[in-house]
Amino acid sequence: MHDTLSNKKKYIRLGQAARIAPGRPSANCIWRWCRKGILSRTGQRIRLQHIRIGGKIFTTGGWLDEFGKSLAAADAEYFDQAEQEGFTPSPRPRTRGEKERQASIERAERDLEEAGV
């Protein structure tokens, strides 16, 4: 059965969801979870359930919990499969830190200067 407003669920705006979600993501991040979802390691796209009323978008605390549990279940499935197939999953690529970023900028500036640009 579909959830309806008559079920009197506690709908919350995405900004409110951002304040109660673990890790304190931004409201924009919550919207991306609704719209695009997150691609799990298993290849499954998991989206945060939401409802649109007029021009406003709402979710619930329960839907946030279900979203997190779905992501965790997909991770568990992936790692279980990896264990059965005898391979070690590689960690996600690390993003550059501020020092690495700054060093890259300085190298690019030196290269441009040497090229006479």
Image (cartoon, grey):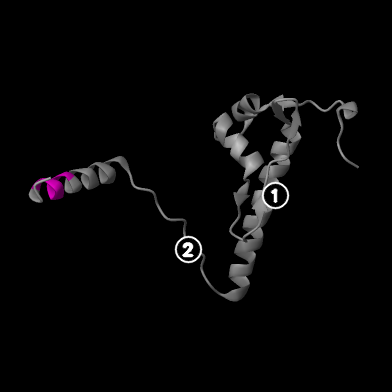
Amino acid of disc 1: Ser
- In the image, is 98 to the left or to the right of 107? right
Residue 37 included in the magenta stretch of the image? no
Image location of residue 22, percent across then percent down:
59, 35
Residue beneath the point at 30% across and 40% down: 98
Amino acid of disc 2: Ser
The circle on residue 90 is 2
Classify the position of the C terminus by image quarter: top left
- In the image, is 43 to the left or to the right of 101? right
The majority secondary structure of the magenta stretch comes to helix
Q: Which residues are magenta?
A: 109-113
Q: Secondary structure at mark 1?
A: helix
Q: Residues within 10 Å of mark 2 (few under 14, many from 20)?
A: few
Decide if residue 22 is in sight here. Answer: no
Q: Secondary structure at mark 2?
A: loop
Q: In this orientation, which residue lies closer to the viewer: 72 or 57?
A: 57
Q: Which residue is mark 1?
A: 70
